Image (spheres, rainbow, N blue to C red):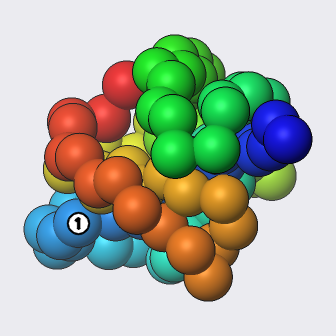
Amino acid sequence: MKMSSTPMPYRSRRSRSASTAASSACAPRRRLAGFATARAAPGGTTVVEIPAPRRAAQIWDAESDAWHTVQGRYRLRAGRSYADLRVEATCDAL
């Protein structure tokens, strides 16, 4: 029996400085940053690459009618679902 799973990376802000707090005030604390489907035999493992698009670190600014990158450190977590996150890494804004 083979199992199929869809790892889903979520990104969240690691820390906020005074300059980024205002610009990210309306941004969600966590959001889905991408997904991929993977297959592995029972007890097996597999490696999955999930690109994180630049848009994952951006918020929409209605006043300027444009996307803006929220600078800072992000925590990327991946797993089968938000309730089952098994992998974690950090990175700067994309």
19 and 69: which one is in front? 69
The answer to whether residue 94 shows anywhere in this view is: yes
**Image vertical order of residue 22 relative to residue 40, above or below:** below
The answer to whether residue 68 shows anywhere in this view is: no
* Residue under the point 40% across and 62% down: 86
Q: Position of residue 61 (x, y in %)?
A: 70, 50
78 and 47: which one is in front? 47
Q: Position of residue 2 (x, y in %)?
A: 82, 37
Disc 1 packing (10 Å; few <14; some 14–19; many ≥20): some
88 and 72: which one is in front? 88
Q: Quadrant of residue 10?
A: bottom right
Q: Quadrant of residue 16?
A: bottom left
User: Left of 89 or right of it: where is 32?
Assistant: right
Q: Position of residue 46 (x, y in %)?
A: 50, 25
Q: Position of residue 26 (x, y in %)?
A: 62, 75
* Residue under the point 52% across and 45% down: 43
Q: Which residue is mark 1?
A: 14
The amino acid marked with disc number 1 is Arg
User: Left of 28 or right of it: where is 15?
Assistant: left
**Image vertical order of residue 18 relative to residue 57, above or below:** below
Q: Quadrant of residue 50?
A: top right
Residue found farthest to the bottom: 83
Q: Dividing the image into 4 quarters, which one contains the C terminus?
A: top left
The secondary element bearing badge 1 is classed as: loop
User: Left of 90 or right of it: where is 24?
Assistant: right
